Image (spheres, coloured by chain):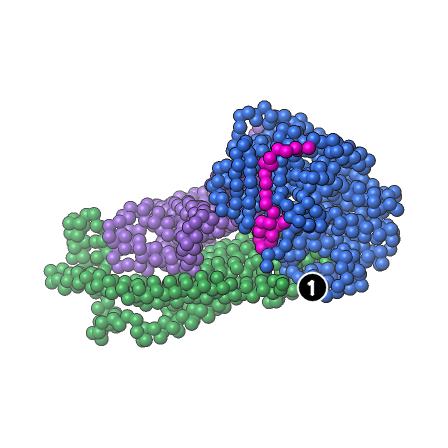
Amino acid sequence: MKINRNRTPQGVLKQFSDLIRQRKDIRWLLFWLAGLLGLWLWDSIFLNPLAYELIRSAIVHTFVGASAAVAFSLFIGWSAGIALYFLENGRARSIHLLLMFFLNLIRSIPQIVGLLIGYIILTLLIAFGFLQSPLSQILWMAFVISIFCSLEVLDLVTERIMHFRKSDYFHAMLCCGIKESRIINIEILWKNSLSHLLHKLVSLFGVAILLQCSIDFIISVGLSTDVSLSNFPVTLGSLLAKLDSKQDILALGSMLVEPSYASRILFQHLQGVSVAFVIVFTLLCVFQIADGLVRQYDL
Amino acid sequence: MKKKLIDHAFSILFVTLTFAMLLLFGVKGETADQHKNDALVESLVHQHAIDFGNPLHKSLFKETLNLFHPDQRAKNDSLLQAIDSYRMEQFTNQVYKTGSTPKGLSLQALLPLAGMYCNFILIYVVVMAISYYAAHTAAIYYFVKRKQRASSHPMTIDTKDRYSRLRITGNMTVLVLQTVLKGIAYLILFAPAYIIAYSLKSTFESGGYVFMIVLGVISNGLLVTYAYKFYTFLLNESRKGYVQNAIVKGLNNSYEWNTPDGISFLSVLKLKKFFPSHVFQHIYKNARYQYIPTMKQHASFLVTGLIIIEMALNIQGHLCYELLQDILYKRIDIALVIIFGIFLVVKATEVLVDYWFFFESQQYENKS
Amino acid sequence: MNMPTFNITIAKHGRNLVHVDDFRIDENKITFLFGESGIGKSLLAKAIYGLLSPDEFTITINGEPYNRYREKEETREIQQSSFFMFQEPSSHLNPLLTIGSQLNEGSLTGRLQDSGILQRLWEMTDAVDMKKMLGIYPKPYRPSGGEKQRFLLAMAFLKIEMMQESIPEHIKTFFVFDEPSGSLDNHFRDVFLSVLFEKFQKRKFTVLLITHDYSIISAVKTAGLNILNDISYKELSLKHNDLTLNNFKSEHYMSWVKIQQESKKTSVPAGARPPLLHVESGLEVFGRRLVISRDRKGGSSCPLEIHPYSMVYLKAASGVGKTTFAKTVMGLIRANHLKIDLNLHGTDITLTEDTPRRFWQSSVWGKQMAITFQHADEALNQNSTVRGTLSGLPAKKSRAENIDRMMNGLFEDSIDEIFLKKKVKYLSGGQKQRLNLFRSLVLDTDIIILDEPLNGLDFESIKRVLSMLKEKQKSGKGILLISHNEEIFDAIVPQENVYYLQASHII
């Protein structure tokens, strides 16, 4: 993209509009932020303070959890990829095979079942007095989500290393006396795979939100009679599972039968509709941002 | 292929052994703990001084607990909930009525489970087949539309011509309507299943097979994700050299609908897609072949979606809702059996996909 | 009569890739187009042919948008009557279709059985063997690169035959051969040229032959005696950001080769100095035994030796394993029966298949031996800058003053901050290849292995690189060359320093 160095206000505006037009990822990122801002404004005017506070907390907890899941996935996936590479090429082939076996096993477990098990462990830990703070509970669930999401990062890391190993790039670097660990971490992954990783992490953000909301929704019936659900941090999924939110979602369907009901949806059923909107709108925008990154970097 | 089969066999063996150990040793321990907790709840309920049916007594009890154990408020709440559940169970639990202890894993418990399991597999297979077809068809349609857009000329506007202006206004209206409909479609395709289901709960029967299958295909982003994946494969293949080679050999290269050198719309919709004498046949064949291993991931994602649907919508008589109930009521042995069954479904899909890919790649192997 | 003159601009993501005014190819003549790799020769040819995709590139031809150009009658005529033979045979064959099916589809349908083209290109008459060949699916190692290239050439010739039989003479033609001899050895290159000239003599058509192989000029002079008037040589060059198409004087090249041959006769022999590198013949890798000899036809095997102050040239047919051999000598590929003796600074080191990788890393790579790989695009970090490419290398302070001189020598004094900060992916192919070479030369190792060092270079750059190599040779280095540019390296390397590589399958 050519850079226009015109620094007048009109020039800056033109640069900005060119950027929006040419970059789908930035366009949808701004659209997403604008959507959330619009929702915040609407809710602050028309939603009662208690529900507003609940929704605000739910959004913060969900996004913090999803971000943490993405960060853990990156760390686990990258580390596992490097470990597998050096184990395969070193003398510890048996450890490599064992690690591959367990990774393939995790692949065979549906994510939601894994998250259910994670939640069971969480309730046990809470019952024994651990992980009492909301942040630690969110981070624990983020870690459990990342176990499944990190496999995608691992596959990407492995694929990128293999791609460069097949070409002369890797050998050329070795023969110049550059260390193998530097070649893998810096030359291949940092310098030549950052855009791929960014695209993957953006997609995983959406997956993490979907999984987190789904599992929170499901466990609304409770997973343990030893731990009270009311002490879990509120998230978008758990908020959606509350009776009043469910009624609000039910009202959406009423619009099909009675279109005139549409005028009341954004006022009387605002809590549930807001929560549903944040979830669906975020998933849509994340998908479009990821698609924009594919086009921008020719992935 | 042999290596992969051995890998699969080992993982099935490992998981089977793990579950067997958990069933044999884990459940016994759990039962012992359960007895301990139940003993405490029982002793409290049978206390004459406190009537747990009286809200005042219940609040005083809660405050007393919090006073003596201020650092265990969560546990105190849970104890109260356990007492409520215990009291309710006196009226609702079959086991208490007959006076016998819970049986756990028995033929009586497993037979209905088997029926639910077959149900689950049936829905899974149907959703898998439909989503595979739908993903391919949607991806091909999107690919062709993109190609058509790329080769079309920009609209020339003659503002002096009245009819031209009317046409432009008409086109803009259609464009706006298309955008709105597209937006609604995207929102539905990206919505989690429970949002769609709850909004239509009063209109459709959520436990019906058709509703579940349609929901399984279109919600949770499954269709969009895998259609996009297949579209990416098509795009990558279309950039490869052999496609250019096919073009210079004179194969049809137009992407207009239903023209002699274009793409037949019917071919896109058919189950067995074939595009004779067109470069797209090269692209599709290669993309389809590359896509096969992705089915494993597709299966895992799909099972997750079905579990979410059954659990979130509380669909009684279905496997995953049964799983949730078993976890809640600590029927861990049955829960383990269900989880193992779900694992086998995913594993069986992986094995079948590996076989399918092996079978396809054998066709293209050179016999030396 | 000329084809129209083209003013072509090709851009991608707002970045200008190619811009040339007055690009013209003589009609019904064979034009050999030389020029640095990555300068835009293939892109221009594809643009004229109508092959580029409007959603990937922004193209204007003679001021018209590309969509309009593609719909013109002349363009459609070209596409119906002609053929474009692409550069990389591996990626231009569909791995899921047999070779036979790919030779028998589209406008080539039904032409193969009556044509004798495969027999000509393979010099084969056995129908059973031919049938076997047509029934295979193209895989990375089978058929070989040379065979794949010949299949693409067969497609082109089948189209020529079709054109000559059924297309009227007034219809425009434009046959493009992009690096047609890239994977062929000299013998099959000459076979291709003779078939091409034969077809051309039967009925003339427009041919654009894009190549880096300047030795094709000598082959043409031998094979195309009757049609020399219908052959022209052009060169596309980039000077001060302007792309221009000029006539290339073939005599220039021929006289330069003669001078090199004469100076080779007077070159100083290596003498009785012990070899820097001694590689025993018979190493086994990937199921094959690689045997070194002094005779093109095989004969008794001998070790390969590189003495100081010498250049050694290793020849082999395409697909035998020259690159594999080079990588094995560098310790990048494990081989059985590997024995390498290094004599560097008076120290003797023996390397075998049991030598640990750590030793190669700490003592050999970048310290005693360096290698330049074939494909600069793969060997260089595309996202790094020119300066960044050289950072992280094991540096010797004493070499610092030579680095500028070498760089100026290779890059014709165009070194400035802008150039050093430029990302590798934005360099031309020739610049990339020179940077690729430079990175190995700057390490100043005693032994330098160069795999296709002249890949993608124009004539001026070839002269510059060879002069740099001669300087290295004079400073006492030992250089191992692997190249299909036999004419050029035969003119530089004395016959006693030429080795041949043969491969046989291990049973």
Residue A152 visible, this orientation: yes
Q: What's under tag 1, amino acid-wise?
A: Lys
Report the chain shown in blue.
C
Residue for point 87% across, 45% down: C225
Residue topped by disc 1: C132
Is C328 left or right of B26, judged from the image as shown?
right
Q: Position of residue C71 (x, y in %)?
A: 76, 50
Report the chain shown in green.
B
Membership of C284 in magenta stretch: yes
Residue for point 66% across, 39% down: C312
Q: Position of residue B63 (x, y in %)?
A: 17, 51
Is C31 left or right of B192, judged from the image as shown?
right
Membership of B3 in magenta stretch: no
What hue represents chain A?
purple
Q: Which residues are magenta?
A: C269-292
Residue for point 31% across, 59% down: A223
Q: Give above or below for C462 relative to C123.
A: above
Residue for point 67% across, 26% down: C413
